[in-house]
Image: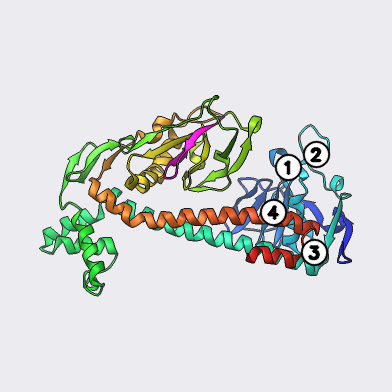
Amino acid sequence: MSADWRDVTLGEFVRLQRGHDLTASEQRPGHFPVMGSAGPNGTHAEFKAFGPGVVIGRSGASMGRVHYCETDYWPHNTCMYVTDFLGNNPLFAFYKLAELDLARYNSGSAQPSLNRNYIYGMSLRIPSRRIQDQIVDVVHSIDRKIDLNRRINQTLEAMAQAIFKSWFVDFDPVKAKIAAKAEGRDPLRAAMSVISGKADSELDTLPTEVLEQLAATAALFSDEMEDSELGRIPKGWTLGALSTVCDLNTSSWSAKTLPASVKYVDLANTKNGEVIEVQTMEGSNIPSRARRILEAGDTIVGTVRPGNRSFALVGEAGLTGSTGFAVLSPRKRYLREYVYLAATADANIERLAHLADGGAYPAIRPELVVSDVLPIPLDDLLGEFHRISSPMFDQVLEIRRANRDLADLRATLLPKLLSGELSVVEAIAEVEA
C-alpha cells in the first residue's frame, strides 16, 4: 500500500449527527428532498443540510442503509447525516460508508438502531483526496452512463406508449377520419396527419417511400365507430380479454425438473419495466418460489403488491422467475409489444392494485392480470404496430443488457478501488475495454 493511503477511524473520516424531526403535518410542498432511513421520502419547503450529502439509516428495517443526495436536503430523524466530510470527497464517502455493511452494528437495543459513537471507532483505510477524486471519476462515469441509458429507455418506452394510447385507447386515427369525412376533407390524409404528428401541409415534404408507408398504415384504420359494451369502438374490432392474445404461466419447473443452477428474476429486482438484476443461484440456495420459466418476449407482472409496478418485458431466454409473477406469453411474435403495453398500462396496474387484497400481504390471482376486457384491433393493424414499435423495444432490451454489464463492472471495480487492490489507471483501462 502506497503512502497515499492511511489508517483512520470512521470518526476521523466523517462526522455524523442525528436527523431532524418532521411530521407529515409539518411537511410543506417544496423542492428539497426529505432523506430518511430508506432514502428519499418526499420533498419539503425547507432544508437543514447543504448538498451533496450522505445519510445513514438509524433505526428499523433500513438501519445501516446509506444514501446520497446531490442537492440541499432535509435529513429526517430516522437517519444520521454527515455534517462534515473532513476534507474527503462526499461521493467517495458515500461509496466507502455503503461498503461497510453498517447494518451489522446494532448498538444493542431491542429495536435495531445505529449509534454514531458506537461506530466512530471503526478502522478504515482511505486514500488521499487526489486518489479519492480519481476513484469517484471512474465510478461516477459508469453511473452516468447507466443513468443516461435509463433515460434513453424511458424516452423509447414513452414513445411506444404514446402510439399505443393514440391507436388503441383514444382511437385518434379513426376519429380523425370520421371528422374529415364530416368536413369534406380526405379521411386518409387526416389519419396520416394524426399518425405522423405532422400538419396536412407538411405531409408532401416527406420522402415518397415514407409517405407511401404512412398511407398504408392509415388505411388500416376504420372510418367508422360502433357501439359495444365498453362504449364506442372502431368498426370491425372485437371485445376480448387480454388472455385472447396471450397465454398465462405456460411453463414452470417442478421439484424434479428444476435445474441445479438458475438465473433468477425476483419481484424486488424488477421495477417499472426493467429487470435490474439477474441472480445466479444454485442447489439449496434456489428459493422455492423460483419456478416460472421465462422466454424472450414474455411480459412479467408482479401479483404481490401490484401497485409497486414490478413488471418488465423479458429480453432473453434461460431465465427463471418468481411465482409472484404472472407470465404473459404472446400467442404470435407480432403481439409482443401489444401484450406488454396493454398489461402494464397505468390503467391496468391501477386496477390490479385496487383488486389486491390480503391486508399485510396484498396480492391478486394471476388470472386477473389478463382478465380486463379490451377492444382488440384487427391482425393487420397489430402487425403494423409491431413493425413500428419493435425496433424501439429491441433497442430498449439491448440497452438493458448493456446496463447490466456496466453494473457488473461497477460491482467488480468499486471494492477493489476502495481497498487499493486495483489502481485507478488499471480501472480506467477496464472501463475503456
Which comes before the other along the chain, label 2 or label 3? 3
What type is the residue that disc 4 sits on? Thr
Which comes before the other along the chain, label 1 or label 3? 1
Q: Select label 3 or label 4 by which is in front.
A: 4
What type is the residue that disc 2 sits on? Asn
Q: Select label 2 or label 4 by which is in front.
A: 4
Q: Could you classify mark 4 by the number of other residues whose Cα lies within 10 Å: few (under 14), some (14-19), or many (20 or more)?
A: few
Start and end of the magenta stretch? 289-303
Q: Is residue 351 above or below residue 223?
A: above
Q: Is residue 184 above or below residue 265?
A: below
The residue that mark 3 highlights is: 88
The residue that mark 4 highlights is: 412
Q: Select label 1 or label 4 by which is in front.
A: 4
Which comes before the other along the chain, label 1 or label 4? 1
The residue that mark 1 highlights is: 63
Which comes before the other along the chain, label 3 or label 4? 3
Which comes before the other along the chain, label 2 or label 4? 2
Q: Which mark is residue 106?
A: 2
Q: Residue at x 58, y 46 (%)?
A: 277
Image coords of residue 396 (percent x, y): 46, 55
Q: Secondary structure at mark 4?
A: helix
Q: How many marks?
A: 4
Contact between labelled residues 1 and 2, with CB atoms less than 8 Å apart? yes
Q: CA distance from mark 2 to mark 4?
A: 28 Å
The answer to whether residue 231 is left or right of residue 409 is left
Q: Quadrant of the C terminus?
A: bottom right
Inspect the magenta stretch and tell me whether residue 300 lies in it: yes
What type is the residue that disc 3 sits on? Asn
Q: Residue at x 24, y 63 (%)?
A: 214
Inspect the magenta stretch and tell me whether residue 37 lies in it: no
Contact between labelled residues 4 and 2, with CB atoms less than 8 Å apart? no
Q: Quadrant of residue 183?
A: bottom left
